[in-house]
């Protein structure tokens, strides 16, 4: 197996092939799915290894004292050989991981082979493919918790033990100095406990992150902002607790703690910072200085960690294993969010390069995970590592509903909200050969308003009356997202041609239900409102770009902006995520431009899962990256797109201007749209024209059903990818 190691004498980092550890009694053999780099403790060790021998001695005076004692006992030559032998050997790295139980040792009955567990310990939860972990240093992962999140268990236990040492009470105010990985977790744990938190860190991005995760205010410890926030929150009395989660050689943290703590406040040291306590300041306030020892009671006790002897809960409520389980429970229940802390996920094989980038400062990170892809694929590093693209089955030959060629196309609308009344009905109300027959809404007034404004012949709240009306040729489903799939299914079974606004479905089960209706009825007359492929400007740009011969790279920036307060899009529990609702637009556009359906999806999210990066891979090696962001400037265009291949670039600027650049003369434009359109045309009118033509003539639907299904499956795979943090394969059903 492979393991990350370091030579402390030379500073060399390596991924070595080492023997697989045996599965001893009292523990389990765990195959790692994810392991977490402690960007504080581990980087300190890596940096120390790169120092000169004198630098190493200065950084570890405790070890120097041991050496001097050995000299006094054993003499210089023997001590020198012992020290050099120890320095010039490989030592392990890592102490926090999540993996799958591969073998269970004698005496273990709380887990079985195949269970997912979180593991702790700098001798047992290493950056290695396999680890033997004793009973009190692992705990089962709660159902539904992603392995990449469970890998935070150990550092979460460290933060939790620190918080427990501070004994916070509801309504108190705490100061967290140092907003690295541990500090960010301390902020969230205190917030979950009902404590108002002020953070201090010289890095403004870490301050911003802590505020997003619950801190009342954060700022540079050298500024007046932190003192002002403390004064405001405590009426000038000072904070109840100070948590020192900073490292380094500065004495500023302990001095700041003394200045901002209240009389008889508590100061808890969690990190490894300089502790030259200013005597007068600490004496005058009678500050209670406490230390937090790693993961909790049991740490460094061989009888607990190696022999599995638990402490009675009546005497020791929170041991290190109970802290580990408690932290995972908080993450699983959403009380602590570790995803925003993940700055980078690296393949395990790239461990050396990752450490070097962290050490050199090229990679600035709060938390970095190693991903073990082969095992992650076997176990399922996401809840759904593979999304099946359902096969479209039809019973016999599909025949369009019989109708007179001269008769108007009679339409019914189910739903008449903002999108229907602003983007669809205005195009249909004045179209020749179209009759707006019936509008169905849940409230009578909205139906009456639509009837009055657009001239529907009838307005009703009775859906069954519409589905049973044989004179109606097509039904538009323009309701809230959660009802799309079911209404589409009913309309297909009723023999109607259906136009459903995106999304077609919010879950795989909903999509399967729609396709079951297609198979049962033989009716595949379905169109989803993916209108951008019909936009005249984009269609002309695609024609100008021409046929591709090689793989393409597509970049699509969607500056979605913030939702207004009260928007039903925010009801994610009922209506799905925002991207699930409208992401199909952008996936469909990319697939249409690349003339193929995606074969895999990788998605990663910024805090809150609102800002997304979605990478689609296509059969010919082409890729499409969709950046869906809500934090951009409102004045910036909503949609910009670049398609690059064969020495050419297609550029679309928010459906206002398009251009094509060709190879040859540097910067030479092959084509640019000659004039700005009066308004952005995103293709709704052309899409409706194509749909009405298909209904009138009985010809093929504007977009093949297989493509609609592939786009929907890819959109659903985004959520699966976010949950697991790895690419999701889109497997075609056989």
Image (spheres, grey):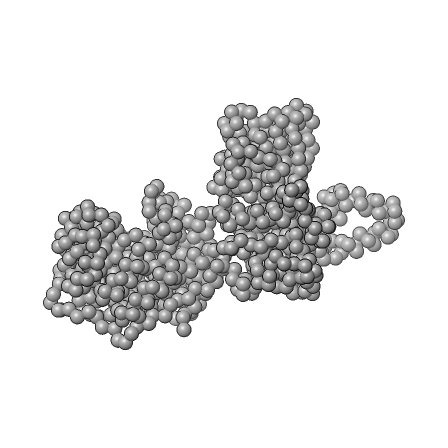
At a point 56% along the width and 27% down the height, the residue shown is 238
Judge by depth and name the residue closer to the eye, 282 or 206: 282
Judge by depth and name the residue closer to the eye, 50 or 351: 351
Count of marks placed on residues:
0
Location of residue 155 with respect to 486 vertically, above or below:
above
Location of residue 13 in the rendering, given as x and y in whole percent from the top left corner: 67, 57
Location of residue 277 with respect to 663 vertically, above or below:
above
Residue farthest bottom in this picture: 396
Location of residue 224 in the rendering, given as x and y in whole percent from the top left corner: 53, 29
Residue farthest left in this picture: 406
**Could you tell me which quadrant the C terminus lies in?**
bottom left
Location of residue 426 with respect to 729 vertically, above or below:
above
Location of residue 651 in the rendering, given as x and y in whole percent from the top left corner: 35, 57
At a point 66% along the width and 52% down the height, the residue shown is 136
Location of residue 476 with respect to 176 vertically, above or below:
below
Looking at the rendering, which quadrant does residue 648 occupy?
bottom left
Residue 622 visible from this viewpoint: no
Residue 164 visible from this viewpoint: yes
Location of residue 133 in the rendering, given as x and y in whole percent from the top left corner: 66, 57
At a point 26% along the width and 65% down the height, the residue shown is 492
At a point 44% along the width and 54% down the height, the residue shown is 613
**Is 50 displayed left or right of 493 in the figure?**
right
């Amino acid at each position: 197996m492979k393991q990350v190691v370091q030579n402390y004498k030379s500073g060399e980092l390596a991924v070595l092939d080492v023997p697989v550890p045996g599965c001893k009694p009292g523990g389990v053999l765990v195959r790692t799915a994810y392991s977490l780099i402690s960007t504080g403790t581990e980087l300190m060790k890596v940096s120390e290894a790169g120092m000169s021998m004198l630098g190493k001695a200065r950084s570890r005076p405790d070890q120097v004292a041991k050496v001097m004692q050995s000299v006094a006992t054993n003499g210089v030559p023997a001590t020198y050989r012992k020290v050099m032998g120890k320095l010039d050997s490989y030592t392990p790295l890592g102490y926090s991981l999540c993996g799958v139980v591969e073998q269970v040792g004698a005496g273990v009955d709380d887990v079985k082979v195949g269970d997912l567990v979180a593991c702790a310990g700098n001798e047992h939860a290493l950056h290695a493919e396999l680890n033997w972990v004793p009973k009190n240093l692992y705990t089962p992962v709660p159902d539904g918790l992603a392995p990449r999140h469970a890998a935070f268990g150990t550092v979460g236990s460290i933060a939790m033990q620190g918080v427990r040492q501070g004994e916070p009470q509801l309504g108190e105010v705490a100061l967290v100095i140092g907003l690295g990985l541990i500090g960010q977790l301390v902020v969230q744990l205190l917030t979950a406990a009902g404590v108002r938190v002020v953070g201090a860190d010289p890095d403004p991005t870490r301050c911003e992150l802590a505020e997003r995760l619950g801190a009342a205010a954060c700022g540079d410890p050298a500024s007046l902002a932190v003192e002002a926030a403390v004064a405001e929150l405590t009426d000038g009395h000072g904070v109840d607790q100070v948590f020192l989660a900073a490292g380094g050689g500065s004495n500023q943290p302990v001095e700041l703690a003394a200045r901002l703590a209240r009389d008889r406040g508590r100061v808890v040291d969690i990190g490894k910072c300089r502790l030259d306590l200013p005597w007068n300041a600490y004496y005058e306030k009678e500050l209670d200085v406490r230390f937090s020892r790693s993961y909790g009671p049991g740490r460094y006790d061989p009888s607990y960690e190696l022999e599995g002897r638990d402490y009675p809960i009546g005497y020791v409520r929170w041991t290190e294993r109970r802290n580990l389980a408690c932290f995972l429970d908080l993450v699983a229940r959403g009380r602590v969010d570790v995803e925003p802390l993940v700055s980078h996920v690296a393949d395990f094989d790239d461990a050396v390069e990752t450490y070097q980038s962290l050490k050199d400062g090229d990679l600035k990170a709060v938390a970095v995970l190693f991903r073990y892809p082969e095992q992650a694929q076997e176990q399922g590093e996401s809840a759904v590592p593979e999304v099946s693209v359902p096969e479209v089955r039809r019973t016999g030959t599909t025949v369009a509903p019989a109708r007179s060629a001269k008769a108007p196309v009679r339409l019914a609308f189910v739903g008449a909200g903002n999108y229907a009344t602003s983007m669809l009905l205005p195009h249909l109300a004045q179209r020749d050969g179209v009759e707006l027959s019936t509008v169905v809404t849940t409230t009578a007034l909205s139906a009456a308003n639509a009837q009055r404004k657009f001239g529907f012949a009838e307005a009703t709240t009775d859906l069954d009356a519409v589905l049973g009306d044989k004179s109606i040729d097509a039904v538009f489903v323009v309701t809230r997202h959660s009802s799309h799939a079911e209404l589409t299914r009913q309309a297909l079974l009723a023999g109607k041609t259906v136009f459903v606004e995106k999304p077609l479905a919010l879950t795989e089960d909903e999509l399967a239900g729609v396709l079951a209706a297609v198979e049962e009825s033989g009716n595949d007359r379905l169109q989803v409102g993916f209108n951008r492929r019909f936009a005249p400007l984009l269609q002309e740009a695609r024609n100008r770009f021409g046929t591709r011969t090689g793989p393409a790279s597509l970049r699509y920036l969607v500056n979605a902006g913030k939702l207004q307060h009260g928007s039903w899009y925010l009801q994610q529990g009922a209506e799905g995520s925002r991207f699930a609702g409208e992401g199909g637009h952008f996936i469909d556009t990319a697939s249409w431009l690349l003339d193929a359906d995606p074969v895999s999806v990788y998605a990663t999210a910024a805090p809150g899962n609102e800002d997304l990066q979605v990478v689609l891979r296509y059969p010919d090696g082409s890729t499409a990256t969709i950046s869906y962001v809500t934090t951009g400037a409102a004045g910036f265009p909503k949609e910009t797109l670049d398609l690059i291949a064969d020495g050419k670039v297609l550029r679309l600027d928010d459906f206002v201007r398009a251009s094509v650049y060709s190879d040859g003369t540097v910067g030479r434009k092959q084509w640019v749209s000659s004039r700005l359109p009066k308004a952005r045309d995103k293709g709704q009118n052309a899409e409706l024209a194509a749909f009405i033509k298909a209904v009138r003539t009985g010809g093929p639907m504007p977009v093949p059903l297989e493509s609609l299904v592939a786009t929907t499956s890819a959109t659903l795979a985004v959520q699966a990818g976010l949950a697991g943090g790895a690419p999701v394969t889109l497997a075609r059903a056989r």
